[in-house]
Amino acid sequence: MTSLIEVSNLTKKFKELTAVDALSFSVPKGVVYGFLGQNGAGKSTTIR
């Protein structure tokens, strides 16, 4: 199946703090996914 979104080894740092570390995922075309996690887990940072 064709991926609509593909992320490979995404890392986001704010000075000394690593907010997202080596995140990889793909979302196939026609599939709905959701981001779940506690406050401060990096959900919004990943989307940006």
Image (tube, rainbow, N blue to C red):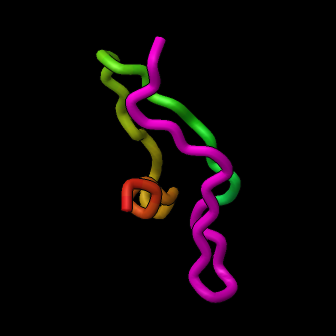
Residue drawn 43% across and 63% down?
Answer: 45
User: What percent of the width, then of the height, locates residue 3?
Assistant: 45, 25
Q: Is residue 38 magenta?
A: no
User: What percent of the width, then of the height, locates residue 46?
Assistant: 46, 56
Q: Of 13 and 41, which appears nearest the observer?
A: 13
Looking at the image, residue 46 sits to the left or right of residue 48; the answer is right
Looking at the image, residue 6 sits to the left or right of residue 8; the answer is left
Q: Of 5 and 13, which appears nearest the observer?
A: 5
Q: Main secondary structure of the magenta part?
A: strand
Against 5, is 18 above or below?
Answer: below
Number of numbered labels in the structure image: 0
In the picture as drawn, the residue positioned furthest to the bottom comes out as 15
In the picture as drawn, the residue positioned furthest to the front comes out as 2
Against 38, is 14 above or below?
Answer: below
Q: Is residue 2 magenta?
A: yes
Against 36, is 13 above or below?
Answer: below
User: What percent of the width, then of the height, locates residue 5?
Assistant: 43, 36
User: Which of the 4 quarters of the picture holds residue 32?
Assistant: top left
Residue drawn 63% across and 48% down?
Answer: 23
- Write the start and end of the magenta stretch as one range: 1-20
Q: Of 28 and 37, which appears nearest the observer?
A: 28
Looking at the image, residue 10 sits to the left or right of residue 43; the answer is right
User: What percent of the width, then of the height, locates residue 4?
Assistant: 38, 30
Residue drawn 36% across and 33% down?
Answer: 34
Against 6, is 15 above or below?
Answer: below
Residue drawn 37% across and 62% down?
Answer: 48
User: Which of the 4 quarters of the picture holds residue 2?
Assistant: top left
